[in-house]
Amino acid sequence: MQCDAKFDFITRKHHCRRCGKCFCDRCCSQKVPLRRMCFVDPVRQCAECALVSHKEAEFYDKQLKVLLSGATFLVTFGNSEKSETMVCRLSNNQRYLFLDGDSHHEIEIAHISTVQILTEGFPPGEKDFHTYTSLPGSQPASEGGNARATGMFLQYTVPGIVGVTQLKLMAVEDTNASRRPAAAWLAAMHKAAKLLYESRDQ
């Protein structure tokens, strides 16, 4: 299906466990765990799929713990002028973002359409969107350099409500007077968004 090799009794077909396409042994020789499909032990994958699976494995080992732990943000819903200090974290089943403060909000991950990372070093305005990552349904745009993330815009849909809802999170100090957990959470969220975009067609 994908490889130019002519298959016969000696040259056998091998299928990639991630994309399902057929390859010769040389083109499908990498063995990588595929946790998103419940393969804990390494399984045969083509080179392209193996690259994404390696990134996912790193995400599961490092960034996922950060997202589950959560961090403190100043949260603004829509065009409201009021903001609320809330802890944002990923739910244990990885399907929702929970925001807890004086109120509680849940955003289903599948309904998030775009993630825009705000970085410091730019005046307010369009240049705030230094890093932009699309989720399924949007086109990718260029990423910024190594600037420090200070906040994030999410756009998502709410069942039963027409149009897109916007949410802004700005990093604030936690109980230890540190913004490091918020910065680490934003970096992990950025990597999660990238992985969703890269793997959406696989």
Image (tube, grey):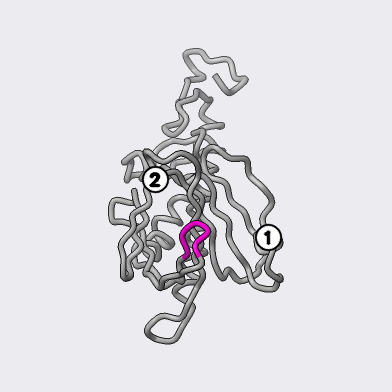
Q: Which residues are magenta?
A: 76-80
Sort mark 2 into few (<14), some (14-19) or many (20+) by Cα contacts within 10 Å. Answer: some
| Residue 55 locus on image (x, y percent) | 50, 51
Residue ID at (51%, 13%): 8
Residue ID at (46%, 70%): 83
Q: CA distance from mark 2 to mark 1?
A: 30 Å
Q: Is residue 65 left or right of residue 172?
A: left
| Residue 26 locus on image (x, y percent) | 55, 32
Residue ID at (64%, 72%): 120
In this rendered view, identify the residue nearer to me: 182 or 66. Answer: 182
Say above or below: 137 vs 117: above
Q: Is residue 50 visible?
A: no
Point out the image quarter for the N terminus.
top right
Residue at image mark 1: 144
Question: Can you tell which of label 2 and label 1 is closer to the viewer?
Answer: 1
**Quarter of the image where one finds residue 145:** bottom right
Residue ID at (46%, 83%): 178
**Amino acid at dot 2:** Pro
Say above or below: 2 vs 109: above
Q: Main secondary structure of the magenta part?
A: loop
Residue at disc 1, secondary structure:
loop
Q: Is residue 148 left or right of residue 37?
A: right
Residue at image mark 2: 33
